[in-house]
Image: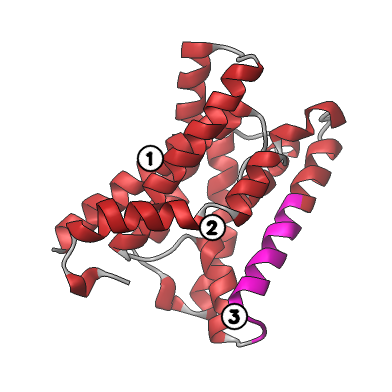
Amino acid sequence: MLKKRIVMSIFGLLICAFSVGLFRMARFGVDPFQALMNGLNSVVPLDFGTTYLIANGILFLFMLTADRHYIGIVTFLNMFFFGYLVDFSHRMLMHMFGEPGIPGRILFLVSGIVVMCFGSAFYYTADLGVSVYDAVSLIIANTWHIWQFKFVRVTADLICVACGIALYILGGGSWTRIGVIAGIGTVITAFFMGPLIDFFRVKVTDPMVEPAGLK
């Protein structure tokens, strides 16, 4: 059973990383944490994967000292490999399709949403830890009991998007290309992905594991 959940975690991670590559091709915005990472990558002279690893390493130190309960295999897989997988998937898609027009960008956005929700369903059902970004909101809400999780998460997401935009402009980015950081794709990932993830969990991933593995 554990082996199956590990495989599901790895598969979900791969699919989610590929979906971020699709979002970057669409240029209609990415999820809030990726918006922060893209903005940070604009001012840091490192590739995206290394920037992602360093930023997550800092958040992991917070996670390690505040509450280790949320640490699992997914935490380490996400921290060490996700950024590099996103880099690889984006380069591969650029090599295959080049710069897409508006119809292509819309297609990439829709595909990214579906693929991200599909991958997330595997990630959540496996229940083998959370990413360091997810852990920050969970610790503030459930460990420190400062505020309800939904309010903490929305606040964290808004801060990430605002900082991502500021860093992108600071790094020389153009306001006309701000959609790379935040746009309709960011709004959709922040507010409207839950039902589709639940659909994939009910129809695909939850039946793959025993009841004890469900959350």
Q: CA distance from mark 1 to mark 2?
A: 22 Å
- Residues 147 and 46: in front is 147
The residue singled out by tag 1 in the image is: 15
Tag shown at residue 141 = 3
- Seen in the picture, residue 167 relative to 46 is either above or below; the reply is below
Tag shown at residue 181 = none
Q: How is the image coloured?
A: secondary structure
Q: CA distance from mark 3 to mark 2?
A: 21 Å
Element marked by disc 3: helix
Give the extent of the magenta segment: 146-161
Q: Horizontal and vertical percent for residue 195?
A: 47, 56
Per the picture, the main secondary structure of the magenta-coloured stretch is helix
Q: Which badge, 1 or 2, is on the more N-terminal residue?
A: 1
Residue beneath the point at 52% across and 30% down: 22
Q: Horizontal and vertical percent for residue 96?
A: 46, 12
Dot 1: within a 10 Å radius of its alpha carbon, few (fewer than 14), some, or many (20 or more) residues? many
The residue singled out by tag 2 in the image is: 57
Q: CA distance from mark 3 to mark 1?
A: 28 Å
Q: Is residue 159 visible?
A: yes
Q: Is residue 116 left or right of residue 106?
A: left
